[in-house]
């Protein structure tokens, strides 16, 4: 630049740009790490001491293909639990007696055929029976067999707080008050039914707990009997004959007159009816003799004392908004037990 010349001024824009440009040595701001949301504490409902008692009792006589449907609902048997645990309950303070429980099922109503589990409680010093009855509406005959033949037995029930791993003050409290509890269990598994013959498989569905009822009154025997007379090549003739009021020949003549029986079959029919009546009367006579002989057996007297001193309760689940409506409650238990003393 020549001497005495003036210096040119720097453009204002350049000056401002230099002023706002950050220095290379400026410190970079630290990144703030976002905190992870903490999961809310999970609430687990405390299990009740006898909460699974109703499930431990096998529902005897229920169809195997419907067994699983029972457990699709969370049935509430807290009423049964209270009878054990609360002062004044039916099973609280029963001395040397024990409680024997077995399960059954009933349908809620004809319009809603849902299986409802029920329990029967027998309060007594010993098991009501070590036998099981096999009987159905379709089967006229009935069997009484040892429980173990059908893989059933009375199994001790251990309350939750007395099982291994539980050690609390509540366990001591409830353990001292609860009587011994036994449930009728079954070790037969559904998968094993596939290898069974149909006759044995069906027996499981016809099972019902057996109890000798010495106070059962002798039922009045009907004198009306079914007659199924074979007459090939025609179909058998089905009639009902009352040996108290019907006379064989007169009854036969009426059938011939009504053209239900041909004349040439008259003698054969009358002989057949007389034989059937003789068989029926013999069966009734044998049953009466067996009853008389049974009454003389010391075991009968023992059973009579047991029956008179035991107590029977039938337990229905508590109605909840999440379970089907129970429209009817009945004291009836089964053919052998008759009816309960009380419904819970």
Image: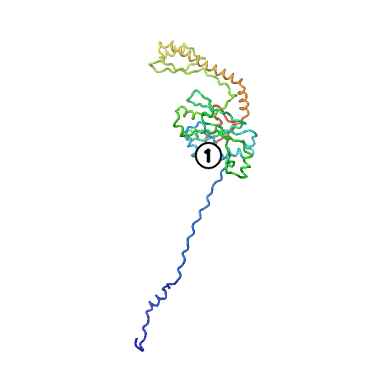
Query: Where residue 96 appears, x then y in whole percent?
Result: 64, 33
Q: Is residue 160 above or below residue 244?
A: below
Q: Is residue 281 or residue 289 the one in the foreground? A: 289
Residue at 61 percent across and 21 percent down: it is: 297
Q: Secondary structure at mark 1?
A: loop
Q: Quadrant of the C terminus?
A: top right
> Label 1: how many residues lie within 10 Å, few (<14), some (14-19) or many (20+)?
many
Q: Is residue 330 above or below residue 44?
A: above
Q: Quadrant of the N terminus?
A: bottom left
Residue at 53 percent across and 29 percent down: it is: 148
Image quadrant assignment for residue 20: bottom left
Image quadrant assignment for residue 10: bottom left
Query: Where residue 218 appears, x then y in whole percent?
Result: 57, 21
How many numbered tags mark residues here?
A: 1
Residue at 61 percent across and 42 percent down: it is: 171
Query: Where residue 276 appears, x then y in whole percent?
Result: 48, 15
* Residue that carries the numbered disc 1 in the rendered image: 75
Name the outermost residue toward the front: 164
Determine whether, in the image, residue 133 is placed left or right of residue 179: left
Name the outermost residue toward the left: 2
Determine whether, in the image, residue 251 is placed left or right of residue 217: left
Q: Is residue 166 above or below residue 296?
A: below
């Amino acid at each position: 630049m020549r001497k005495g010349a003036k210096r040119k001024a720097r453009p204002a824009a350049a000056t401002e740009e230099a002023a706002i440009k950050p220095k290379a040595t400026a410190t970079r701001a630290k990144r703030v790490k976002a905190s992870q949301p903490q999961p809310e504490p999970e609430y687990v409902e405390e299990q009740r001491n006898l909460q699974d008692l109703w499930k431990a009792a096998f529902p005897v006589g229920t169809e195997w293909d419907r067994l699983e449907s029972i457990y699709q609902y969370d049935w509430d048997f807290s009423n049964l639990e209270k009878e054990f645990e609360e002062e004044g309950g039916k099973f609280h303070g029963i001395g040397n007696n024990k409680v024997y429980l077995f399960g059954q099922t009933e349908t809620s109503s004809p319009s809603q055929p849902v299986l409802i589990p029920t329990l029967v409680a027998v309060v007594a010093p010993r098991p009501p029976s070590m036998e099981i009855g096999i009987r159905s509406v379709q089967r006229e005959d009935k069997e009484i067999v040892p429980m173990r033949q059908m893989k059933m037995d009375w199994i001790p029930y251990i309350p939750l707080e007395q099982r291994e791993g539980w050690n609390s003050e509540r366990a001591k409290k409830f353990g001292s008050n609860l009587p011994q509890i036994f449930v009728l269990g079954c070790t037969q598994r559904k998968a094993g039914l596939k290898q069974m013959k149909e006759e044995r498989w069906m027996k499981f569905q016809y099972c019902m707990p057996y109890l000798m009822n010495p106070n059962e009154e002798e039922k009045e025997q009907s004198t009306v009997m079914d007659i199924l007379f074979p007459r090939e090549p025609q179909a058998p003739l089905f009639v009902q004959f009352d040996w108290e009021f019907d006379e064989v020949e007169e009854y036969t003549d009426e059938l011939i007159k009504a053209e239900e029986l041909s004349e040439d079959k008259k003698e054969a029919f009358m002989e057949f009816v007389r034989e059937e009546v003789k068989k029926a009367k013999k069966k009734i006579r044998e049953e009466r003799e067996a009853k008389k002989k049974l009454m003389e057996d010391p075991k009968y007297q023992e059973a009579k004392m047991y029956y008179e001193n035991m107590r029977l309760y039938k337990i229905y689940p508590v109605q909840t908004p999440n379970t089907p409506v129970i429209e009817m409650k009945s004291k009836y238990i089964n053919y052998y037990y008759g009816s309960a003393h009380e419904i819970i």
